[in-house]
Image: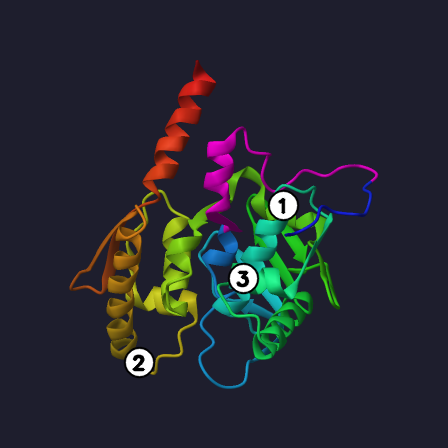
Amino acid sequence: MSTPPTDTVQTPLPALLPPPRGGGQARFNETMRICPHVFLRSTVFGLTGKGKRKYFDDALLASTDEFTVRFTGLQLDQTDLDVWLELVHLLRYQPVGSTVTTSHLELLTMLGKADSGQNRQALQRQLTRLRATAVKVCSVSGSYIGGLIDAAAISKTLAIRLDPRIVELFAGNRFTRMQHAVRCGLTPMGKWLYGYFSTHIQPPPIRVDEIQRLCGSKATNLDAFRYSLRSTLKQLKRACDANDETFNWRIDRAGVLHADWIGSKKYVRWSQKVSTTSSA
């Protein structure tokens, strides 16, 4: 299991999540992964496809209109996001800027992978990519310039720390919760779509070509992408149905995707209970 931070912080910073109020909330939080909206509404963690990853130098990435995102580093994909979400999960209750100690075995187990030499090497490459990046996010609510991991000491154990300023991306409820059980069973495109839809209470209609732009698909033409999209949406619906979430979709003749998504019914019931208790 991960160990608490060993470094001392002179002025404690806020945590990404407040400590759970009770066992029910703690169990619920354990099943969820949190992520800022900007990473789920852009190509920061896009679809890279096969072949050599691109290197970006202060490149403007595709994103929804409320964000401007510039990126420096090797192109990241949904497997990199898998790792980053687990690191955030380990650090979620710690003051931002604290260090958490974990291991290859623990992270690979969290990722649902076997503890093999090949998987350890792949994990080290992912940690290196996450460390060797710089992201600049600008929006009406603020900005962030920094990395995705502030430090990653790799030896027999892994010592991980996030940039303290990254808390700005989570402030004001500008993050979403995703069910780990839903996400881990999806293809890379399915993971991107699930992340995007989960950032909306009611997803707005969106053109198919806009989805292709935002996720960074390498499909050679729109017809090929539309075919792949339909298949992935069917997969996403099955995964949501199996995990107490509601997801329905249709693509109209104008090429616009209409989606109805309701997150975990357990979360909806828990949120209503907390709201009722707070207002009592």
Q: Are marks 2 and 1 in contact (CB under 8 Å)?
A: no
What amino acid does circle 2 point to?
Asn
Bin the neighbour count of mark 1 within 10 Å (Cα to Cα): few under 14, some 14-19, many 20 and up: some
Is residue 262 left or right of 132 when viewed as pictured?
left
Which contiguous range is marked in magenta?
Answer: 10-36
Name the residue beneath numbered marker 3.
Answer: 109
What amino acid does circle 1 point to?
Glu
In magenta segment, residue 22: yes
Marks 3, 2: nearer the viewer: 3
Relative to 198, residue 43 above or below? below
SS at mark 1 in the image: helix
> Where's residue 16, x and y in %?
61, 42
Labels in figure, total: 3
Question: How far apart in space, not on screen, are marks 3 and 2 (Cα)?
Answer: 38 Å
> Where's residue 38, x and y in %?
51, 54
State the colouring used for the structure image. rainbow
Name the residue beneath numbered marker 1.
Answer: 168
Name the residue beneath numbered marker 2.
Answer: 221
SS at mark 2 in the image: loop
Q: Residue at x 61, y 73 (%)?
A: 120
Quadrant of the rendered structure where residue 236 is?
bottom left
Question: How far apart in space, not on screen, are marks 2 and 1 (Cα)?
Answer: 37 Å
**Is any part of residue 273 visible from this angle?**
yes
Question: How far apart in space, not on screen, are marks 3 and 1 (Cα)?
Answer: 29 Å
Relative to 272, residue 242 above or below? below
Marks 3, 1: nearer the viewer: 3
Bin the neighbour count of mark 2 within 10 Å (Cα to Cα): few under 14, some 14-19, many 20 and up: few
> Where's residue 166, x and y in %?
65, 50
Is residue 7 left or right of 56 when viewed as pictured?
right
